[in-house]
Amino acid sequence: MEAKQYVEEMQKKIHENDRGQVEYLQAVDEFLPSVEVFLKENPAFIEANILGILIEPERILQFRVPWQDDKGNWRVNRGYRVQYNSAIGPYKGGLRFHPSVNLSVMKFLAFEQIFKNSLTGLPIGGGKGGSDFDPKGKSDAEVMRFCQSFMTELQKHIGPSTDVPAGDIGVGGREIGYLYGMYKRLRNYDAGVLTGKPLGYWGSQARTEATGYGCVYFVKHLLNDSNDSFAGKKVVVSGSGNVSIYAIEKAQELGATVLTCSDSTGFIYDPDGIDVELVKELKEKNRERISKYVETRTGATYYDGQSVWDFKVSYDIALPCATQNEINEDQAKILVENGGKIVAEGANMPCTLEAVHVLDEAGVYYCPGKAANAGGVAVSALEMSQNAERLSWSFEKVDGMLDDIMKNIYETCRDTANRYDAANNFVLGANVAGFEKVANAMISQGLV
Ligand SMILES: NC(=O)C1=CN([C@@H]2O[C@H](COP(=O)(O)OP(=O)(O)OC[C@H]3O[C@@H](n4cnc5c(N)ncnc54)[C@H](O)[C@@H]3O)[C@@H](O)[C@H]2O)C=CC1
Ligand SMILES: O=C(O)CCC(=O)C(=O)O
């Protein structure tokens, strides 16, 4: 069968089988057409029906999570773990606690994680999990009871060589601590079962910083290719969570001015450059709304209920670091009018397919999340290595390895795109390079 026909049939089948799973179908629709060029050159993969097999998750777990709130009421949420592909290593990927979590969101994230993890060059398969539990507004005790209940079930299915979860939206050091405590109580000590742990019990140096720093390193290497740098550049960032904070910090360290950050209630515009220490205090320490920022920084403006991506201001680089589908087609047009030349995704799938099309047409360098935000999971894999050898590496060592890994991912995406006469098409570069390694491993393992 011709590659084009094969890809179209796969797309049709997945749309029939997974009708209504909007985010998941979006991720698959981005991926499948881009690997057609590779399949055309390698028909043996079509004969093996590699896409048909790859697209089916190896296993999906869904479970109830009952927990008691501070008033003694019993509540229940849905827990998930999608163990998508283990061809090149144990399932690896974060846990997300957010009310928008459903099976479609879990599957899109786990699917992208397969190729992201492959691009890191480290031995990790793809998985993702989470719950529709909302930690916002909950007491520490409520979050702890939820995490303990969640882990009571999840522990049956994970392990340092089986499946190694970490954080994502709504899951940071506090949640990882409660989750790890419960795992240890039920299964005994084994630090390698979770990553993103606090430093005091075998977390890795630079894991907190890794996704945001890694995203900036990716862009740094892209700029270096044309003898350019972050110095003097204007950057816009969305979000004010883990990824955003460290993207802002590194971009400014490299000489850029970051003009914005946001949360789900609105955004901040600070023409003098975001005060990242203040954002850390508001968000990491006090768990406050971002609107509080202007109480200290009087030269900044807070735009209530508005998106960074509707804002008209001139800039060079956009780093969407909040959540999926935060930039739609119209907002991508605004981004282009604002002068944006590079979009690097700190978040997973923050641009809709229509938005990506607008960016492509305008000649914007579009760096998809599975390449640009792979630094977080890469350092998680380094945390697994440190846990296995019962050693901790220095910040400088891990940060240096992160920079090298991001350089390698950038060059892999660039060179793979060039190989198919698709210069600067980092979507094609990331998908083909990530896919090739996983597909080869699956075939050599007998497609089981
Ligand atoms: N933490 C990590 O290591 C990695 C995270 N990512 C992705 O980066 C993005 C951000 O994750 P984190 O910073 O870890 O989470 P976080 O929980 O620390 O912060 C999330 C940020 O996004 C904003 N946000 C979340 N949902 C939103 C919504 N529906 N509308 C508007 N704003 C919203 C929040 O207000 C917050 O500022 C996610 O897409 C995540 O999947 C990707 C790779 C690794
Ligand atoms: O560090 C990890 O294992 C997970 C990171 C993650 O969830 C992601 O890359 O989206």
Image: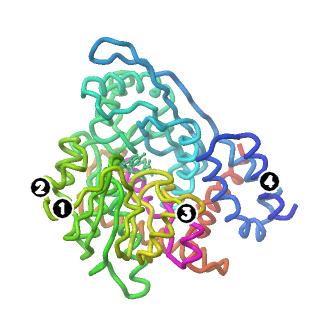
SS at mark 3?
A: helix
Dot 2: few (<14), some (14–19), or many (≥20) neighbours within 10 Å? few
Instruction: Compare marks 1 and 4 and give the one earlier in the sequence.
Output: 4
Q: Nearer the viewer, mark 3 or mark 1?
A: 3
Task: Residue 380: give its label.
Answer: none
Q: Amino acid at mark 2?
A: Thr
85 vs 272, nearest the viewer: 272
Badge 4 density bin: few <14, some 14–19, many ≥20, Cα 10 Å: some
- Kind of element beneath mark 4: loop
N-terminal of the pair, mark 4 or mark 2, is 4
Residue 275 numbered mark, or none: 1
Query: Residue 329 bears which disc, if any?
Result: 3
Amino acid beneath label 1 = Asp
The boundaries of the magenta stretch are 355-384
Circle 2 is placed at which residue position? Answer: 296
**Residue occupying image coordinates x 54% and y 42%:** 105
Give the class, few, some or many, for how many residues have Cα within 10 Å of label 3's Cα (few <14, many ≥20).
Answer: some
Question: How much space separates mark 3 and mark 4, taking CA atoms?
Answer: 37 Å
Earlier in the chain: of badge 3 and badge 1, it is 1
Which element is circle 1 on? loop
Quadrant where the image shows the C terminus:
top right
Residue that mark 4 sits on: 48
